[in-house]
Image: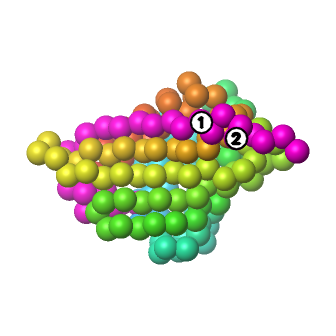
Amino acid sequence: MTNVFSDNRTDTASRVIMAEPQTIYQAFLNPKSLVSWLPPKGMSGHIDNFDPREGGTYNMTLTYEEDQPSSGKTSENTDVYQGKFLELVPDKRIVQLVIFDSKSPDFTGEMIQKWLLESITEGTRVTIVCENVPKGIRKEDHDLGLKSTLENLAIFVE
């Protein structure tokens, strides 16, 4: 079997958001909030089985909007994944395991996603670090998606 993570790629994005770390942390732990800001531009989301505690899991389906070119990981127009909360440090850090539901070996495996919240004078610096990014996710697309998600989060909490 080929190791789809042979290059162990790490993608990151960061943005200063004019909100307190507590506000951002809570936006992550409420499924209705999370599904409203997490999907990047051009996608919508649906969450099942949300258990926001260390060791807890959730399932999310991201659907490409009709006018968007789609190349979903699960089907032509969807990305389905399971998230597992590995670490929850209130107002500081959220670490989760992301497992895509895909038949393609380019998207299989486990990606670690860290959300780091740093209180600064202007608000909160939010940094997303994605480790072991599957090779099927183009870096350019991932970078755009991460920036879009941070923009959505800023709009949601500011």
Q: Residue 148, image x and y in percent? A: 44, 35
> Label 2 belongs to which residue?
5
Left/right of residue 9 with respect to residue 5 in the rendered view: left
Left/right of residue 104 with respect to residue 46 in the rendered view: right
Residue in view at x 61 percent, y 44 percent: 132
Left/right of residue 26 with respect to residue 11 in the rendered view: left
Q: Mark 1 belongs to which amino acid?
A: Arg
Q: Give the residues drawn in magenta, as a range.
A: 1-28
CA gap, disc 2 to disc 1?
7 Å
Q: Residues within 10 Å of mark 2 (few under 14, many from 20)?
A: some
Q: Is residue 65 visible?
A: no
Residue in view at x 88 percent, y 45 percent: 1
Q: Are marks 2 and 1 in contact (CB under 8 Å)?
A: yes
Q: Is residue 11 magenta?
A: yes
Q: Is residue 89 magenta?
A: no
Along the viewing direction, whichever of 69 and 11 lies nearer the viewer: 11
Instruction: Specify the label residue 9 is tagged with.
Output: 1
Residue in view at x 47 percent, y 59 percent: 95
Secondary structure beneath dot 2 equals loop
